[in-house]
């Protein structure tokens, strides 16, 4: 019996395509309003403190984090992306490392441990828990973790290649361009979606689905607000704040569902 390919191997393949490189190196500051609000929330306490940035990719978050502190370490386990970051930011402490095993990093050290752009969703659920354990270990008592995760109640859940169909425009040139683009991308999106669909699973509190990013080239975890809170608390964290991606507003602690595409969690290690 053939064993399914682990999610992170599927996703690493997608991240090293030419289109992915182009997207990762765009001059983009924030992924969404929620990320901007979350960074503003943690900025004062993180100022001039040791920071760990997980999943740096091609380096989007490096200047954001280094505005807070020069005591900065960035890691990524996809070597081609890490090399992009090293070329763009020479002299910065950037390391090839898997977040599931950060044993080379000191325990109880970082004031902020961050994992942006929903990177934690791109591994198996058990590995995701291991990443959070490692984030807990390297964060100092009283320090915080910040990460984003796809929302199972949001509009991105259960996307299909139909969304690649061209949107109508009264401008014939614009609509013609959209039709040509769809003709190029639809076959790739359909092939990727059908290839990954057998991996789809539903569990209490979370699901595994093919995501539309990179032309349905990645398979990720979608979680719920209650499940992510439960997981963090079970690992010893205190959930401090959650921001929705769409409006950048705080989500109340008692909220059970959200229509945000993804959720930005801030949690504290007691100390």
Image: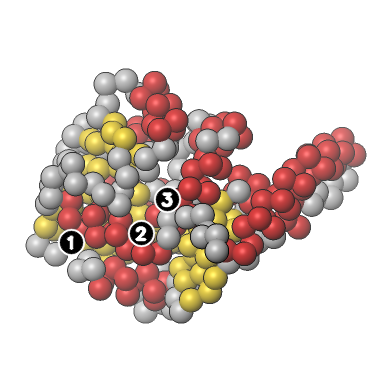
Q: Secondary structure at mark 1?
A: loop
Q: Position of residue 87 (x, y in %)?
A: 39, 21
Circle 2: is it few (<14), some (14-19), or many (20+) Cα within 10 Å? some
**Residue that carries the numbered disc 3 in the rendered image:** 119
Q: Residue at x 61, y 34 (%)?
A: 19
| Label located before the other in sequence (1 or 3) | 3
**Foreground: 239 or 122?**
122
Cα distance, mark 3 to mark 2? 12 Å
Q: Secondary structure at mark 3?
A: helix
Q: Is residue 213 above or below residue 203?
A: above
**Foreground: 157 or 178?**
157
Disc marking residue 127: 2
| Label located before the other in sequence (3 or 2) | 3
Q: How many marks?
A: 3
Circle 3: is it few (<14), some (14-19), or many (20+) Cα within 10 Å? many
Q: Position of residue 222 (x, y in %)?
A: 49, 65
Disc marking residue 44: none
Q: Residue at x 72, y 45 (%)?
A: 188
């Amino acid at each position: 019996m053939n064993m399914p390919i682990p999610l992170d191997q599927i996703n690493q393949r997608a991240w090293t395509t030419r289109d992915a490189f182009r997207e990762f190196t765009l001059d983009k500051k924030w992924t969404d309003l929620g990320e901007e609000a979350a960074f503003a929330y943690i900025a004062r306490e993180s100022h001039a403190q040791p920071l760990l940035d997980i999943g740096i990719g091609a380096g989007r978050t490096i200047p954001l984090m280094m505005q807070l502190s020069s005591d900065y370490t960035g890691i990524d386990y996809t070597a081609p992306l890490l090399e992009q970051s090293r070329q763009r930011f020479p002299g910065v402490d950037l390391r090839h490392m898997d977040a599931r095993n950060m044993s080379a990093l000191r325990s109880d050290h970082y004031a902020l441990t961050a994992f942006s752009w929903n990177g934690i969703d791109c591994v198996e659920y058990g590995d995701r828990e291991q990443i959070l354990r490692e984030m807990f270990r390297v964060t100092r008592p009283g320090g915080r973790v910040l990460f984003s995760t796809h929302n199972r109640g949001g509009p991105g859940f259960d996307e299909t290649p139909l969304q690649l169909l061209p949107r109508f425009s009264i401008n014939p040139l614009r609509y013609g361009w959209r039709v040509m683009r769809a003709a190029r991308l639809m076959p790739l999106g359909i092939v990727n979606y059908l290839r990954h669909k057998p991996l789809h699973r539903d569990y209490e509190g979370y699901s595994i689905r093919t995501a539309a990013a990179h032309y349905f080239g990645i398979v990720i975890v979608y979680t719920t607000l209650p499940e992510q809170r439960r997981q963090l608390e079970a690992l010893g964290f205190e959930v401090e704040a959650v921001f929705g991606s769409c409006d950048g507003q705080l989500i109340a602690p008692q909220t059970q569902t959200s229509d945000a595409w993804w959720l930005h969690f801030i949690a504290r290690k007691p100390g």
